[in-house]
Amino acid sequence: MKRWLFTALSFAAVLFVSIYAVRSGAPDGASLAIPWQAHALAFLGFSLEVIARSLKLTWSAKAVRARLPFMTSVRVSLGGDFGASITPARAGAEPARYLILAEAGVSVPDAMVVMYTELFFEMISLVVVVGAMVLLFDSSPAAQVAMGSIVGLYSAVILTLGTIGLVLSRRTLGEVAPPLAVRLRLTGGRWKFVRRWVDRIRGTVEAFKNMRYRWGAASLAASIVHVGVRFTILPAIVISMSTTSVPLAPLVVWPFGFIYGAGVMPAPAGGGAVEYAFHAALGNVIPAEHFAASLLWWRFYTFYLYIALGALVAGNTVLRALREAEDAEEEFERG
């Protein structure tokens, strides 16, 4: 109950900050409508992103000798977005994706290696896309620092997880908890839980090490497309509306920080941080008469549409995954 109250309050904060940003960033009477061409381009970008991300999952599965149909990948992608949007720091994304994979008949070891492979390729894609942004656009030092910090943090997490997995895969755990585990209170049921997951991690590491590189390269290419196309939506909306020249660089660079920076926000949906950052960074870039519509529709095509479709295709599964994750945490605490 407390978690859902926190989620509701966070979305209320999003609404409040959105209203503030719109009112303070646009003249009275400014329209919230955008041309049909802007809708078409934004929806095209959204569709390409979902397709590329789903292909990345399917091809990641092929790379590690697993099978994952394309439509299941679509459910995994959108369901993960829904789970991420209603949990702090996007913590619900992976439990949601894991349960959708499990219900589709994907084995536990295959699900784990597919999920890690997808995250690993995402990390490389971020490095590639940010490098291209730095080379192609004259971005401000602040924007470069923001992008570098996000990529560095993301890479550190993924590489740390991989390193931990590699180390654990080389360990053989006995039925009796060693002294260190006892001091950490990892005994009884907790120790069985740890042993079970170490066995699964060992299989994940072996499958990742034996990756088929041709399919891995295809998955990485799809990943680069899915990451890159996210940053075409705001320029498409703004340029389709504006009759005056608008600098392209901030419209491409700043959304990177908005989208990926929201992942470290402790509140679901960012708690209004994305909207506030949008107003602060782009309030003097986007023409005032188009600012409100730009913020509204950019947020719709990069966030709300994912939530709606994710709830539609996998809502019940995602909610069940979050409940099971909570139950597992409680069981682990009880030992």
Image (cartoon, rainbow, N blue to C red):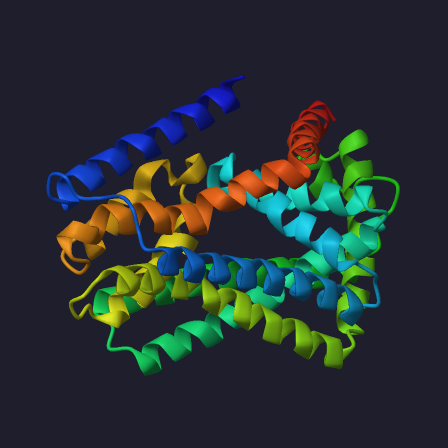
Is residue 145 in view from this perspective?
no
**Picture quadrant where residue 170 is located:** bottom right
Q: Nearer the viewer, residue 309 or 249?
A: 309
Query: Where is residue 172 drawn, in percent x and y?
Result: 84, 55
Q: Which quadrant of the figure contains the N terminus?
A: top right
- Residue located 21% across and 62% down the image: 242
Q: Nearer the viewer, residue 8 or 243?
A: 243
Query: Where is residue 169 drawn, in percent x and y?
Result: 78, 60
Instruction: Give the number of callouts.
Output: 0
Q: Which quadrant of the figure contains the C terminus?
A: top right
**Is residue 289 rendered to the left or right of residue 172?**
left
**Is residue 159 rendered to the left or right of residue 323?**
left
**Picture quadrant where residue 241 is located:** bottom left
**Is residue 148 rendered to the left or right of residue 225?**
left
- Residue located 65% across and 62% down the image: 118
- Residue located 65% across and 28% down the image: 326
Is residue 268 in view from this perspective?
yes
Query: Where is residue 225 drawn, in percent x and y?
Result: 53, 71
**Picture quadrant where residue 190 is located:** top right
Q: Nearer the viewer, residue 101 or 315?
A: 315
Query: Where is residue 218 drawn, in percent x and y?
Result: 67, 76
Residue 185 vs 155, above or below: the answer is above
Residue 48 vs 85, above or below: the answer is below
Q: Residue furthest left?
A: 27
Residue 203 vs 105, above or below: the answer is below
Q: Residue furthest top?
A: 1
Q: Residue furthest front?
A: 36
Q: Nearer the viewer, residue 33 or 204?
A: 33
- Residue located 15% across and 45% down the image: 26
